Image (spheres, grey):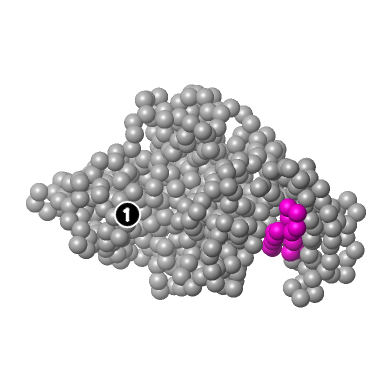
């Protein structure tokens, strides 16, 4: 049964349904790519366009108006009102039995608090949130949210919101400015009735000056919440700076750099490292930093097996924050489907003086230039969970850096999951400067091993470092990487 609305005097008639097939959104993206780009609709009545953050929080969705509320379906959809920084309009449709029908905006879907209530004008939505009984059978938890440009985020069982994903990253860190594509329209397929939490499918149409794209997300909530994602990109112009499967997160500080932080907490971040599993089977761990100047790092690869932004510190003692609970923030792992060919995993680290700013971006940049008027297909699986769903060598669980005398920097790395009766070989390298006092030793208090060394950078302002433990030519640990800067 389509989305039903009781028509009242003065209200428009219920929108007619139209056919929907597996190619509907792809065809719409291809048709849109042949037309000039039209910016997202952002005009709002003045009392909505000038809302403060606190005023916007008053615009609460009425849960009784949720899509599928009261039906024997293990999902419900709640909508975000437009206003504050979320002025852009998106249109949302429901798909039932091969037919699609718009979900119209109505003011009575929301409680407005002290904010002026709109009339029955067609404002559309800013986004939506998907709810399901994730943590217990009698409560619909928020599982994922699509809100703002092409941003979306999700949680897994027992976790809370943290990092986000995006549809595409275009010209990220370009001196001329980044281009932010936006999801223009969504189609949500109604799941079959029943108590079992089966996958749910959401389609999205993306638009930007450089391209259009169609997305198909098959979402399976759980301990590992999975987004099986299919993307078709239709460039309007030649694209040399496109990021596929981008992730966006926040890293403020940790034990690797506290020199600019006067904060009572030991660490503040949504993610603390970029994990990569290369096409050659090597596991790389790049500890994140909050640099003093913009940093862009590229890791060349062919047919990557996966990459993601991780949150490895998982206890309250790691953060001591009873409000933010950074220990419950999810990791997100990108698992390519098929051969992605040659390219780079790109990491962008942006200086920030606040934990409210997302300053970390990671994505796959194909070596191949995307040409105009050609369709490019990508498929991947996003895993939102406490850690990467892949088996890796012993991980580096802490990167600690301190000041020595005469400009020397002291480095200490903690490694878990490695037997203490081994006799490994220490492999530490730097591209510049001098390495001193290299040491490896078992850690009987915490278990695992510890690597320590000193770096004398001399007059260098940037040094690339690598470290791992080996058994002969076989790595026992992942390869730790770090970019030290003054």
Lateral position of residue 220 relative to residue 48, left or right: right
Seen from this angle, which residue lies furthest bottom?
Answer: 445
Closer to the camera in the image, 393 or 17: 393
Which stretch is magenta? Answer: 397-415
Q: Is residue 141 magenta?
A: no
Closer to the camera in the image, 22 or 426: 426
Q: Tell me if residue 337 comes above or below residue 443 in the rendering.
A: above
Can see residue 406? yes
Residue 253 location, quadrant: bottom right
Lateral position of residue 94 relative to residue 223, left or right: left
Residue at the spot x=26%, y=53% of the render? Answer: 51
Residue at the spot x=51%, y=51% of the render? Answer: 352
Residue 129 % position (x, y):
38, 57
Q: Tell me if residue 422 comes above or below residue 116 in the rendering.
A: below
Residue 233 % position (x, y):
50, 33
Can see residue 383? no
Tell how many labels. 1
């Amino acid at each position: 049964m389509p989305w039903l609305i009781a028509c009242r005097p003065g209200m428009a008639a219920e929108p007619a349904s139209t056919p929907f097939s597996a190619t509907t959104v792809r065809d719409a993206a291809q048709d849109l790519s042949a037309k000039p780009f039209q910016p997202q609709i952002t005009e709002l009545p003045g009392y909505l366009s000038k809302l403060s953050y606190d005023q916007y929080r008053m615009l609460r969705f009425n849960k009784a108006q949720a899509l599928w509320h009261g039906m024997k379906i293990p999902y419900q959809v709640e909508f975000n009102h437009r206003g504050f920084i979320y002025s852009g309009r998106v249109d949302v449709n429901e798909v039932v039995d091969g037919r699609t029908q718009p979900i119209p905006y109505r003011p009575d879907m929301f409680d407005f608090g002290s904010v002026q209530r709109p009339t029955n004008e067609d404002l559309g939505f800013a986004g939506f949130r998907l709810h399901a009984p994730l943590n217990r059978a009698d409560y619909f938890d928020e599982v994922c949210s699509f809100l703002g440009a092409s941003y979306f985020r999700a949680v897994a069982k027992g976790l809370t919101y943290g990092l986000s994903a995006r549809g595409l990253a275009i010209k990220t860190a370009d001196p001329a400015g980044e281009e932010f594509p936006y999801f223009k329209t969504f189609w949500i397929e109604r799941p079959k009735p029943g108590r079992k939490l089966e996958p749910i499918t959401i389609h999205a149409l993306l638009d930007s000056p450089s391209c259009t794209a169609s997305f198909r997300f098959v979402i399976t909530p759980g301990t590992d919440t999975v987004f099986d994602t299919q993307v078709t990109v239709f460039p309007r112009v030649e694209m040399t700076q496109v990021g596929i499967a981008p992730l966006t997160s926040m890293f403020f500080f940790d034990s690797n750099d506290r020199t600019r932080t006067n904060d009572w907490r030991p660490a503040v971040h949504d993610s603390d490292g970029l994990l990569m599993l290369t096409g050659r089977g090597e596991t790389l761990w790049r500890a994140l930093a909050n640099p003093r100047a913009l940093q862009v790092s590229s890791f060349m690869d062919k047919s990557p097996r996966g990459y993601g932004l991780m949150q490895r510190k998982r206890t309250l003692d790691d953060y001591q924050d009873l409000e933010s609970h950074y220990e419950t923030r999810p990791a997100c792992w990108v698992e390519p489907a098929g051969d992605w060919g040659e390219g780079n995993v790109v990491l962008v680290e942006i200086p920030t003086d606040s934990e409210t700013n997302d300053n970390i971006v990671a994505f796959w940049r194909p070596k191949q230039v995307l040409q105009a008027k050609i369709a490019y297909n990508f498929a991947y699986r996003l895993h939102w969970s406490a850690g990467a769903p892949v088996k890796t060598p012993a991980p580096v669980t802490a990167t600690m850096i301190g000041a020595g005398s005469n400009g020397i920097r002291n480095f200490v790395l903690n490694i878990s999951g490695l037997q203490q009766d081994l006799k490994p070989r220490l492999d530490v390298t730097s591209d510049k400067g001098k390495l001193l006092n290299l040491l490896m030793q078992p850690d009987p208090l915490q278990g695992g091993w510890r690597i320590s060394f000193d770096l004398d950078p001399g007059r260098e302002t940037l040094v690339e470092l690598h470290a791992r433990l080996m058994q002969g030519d076989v790595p026992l640990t992942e390869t730790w990487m770090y970019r030290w800067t003054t």
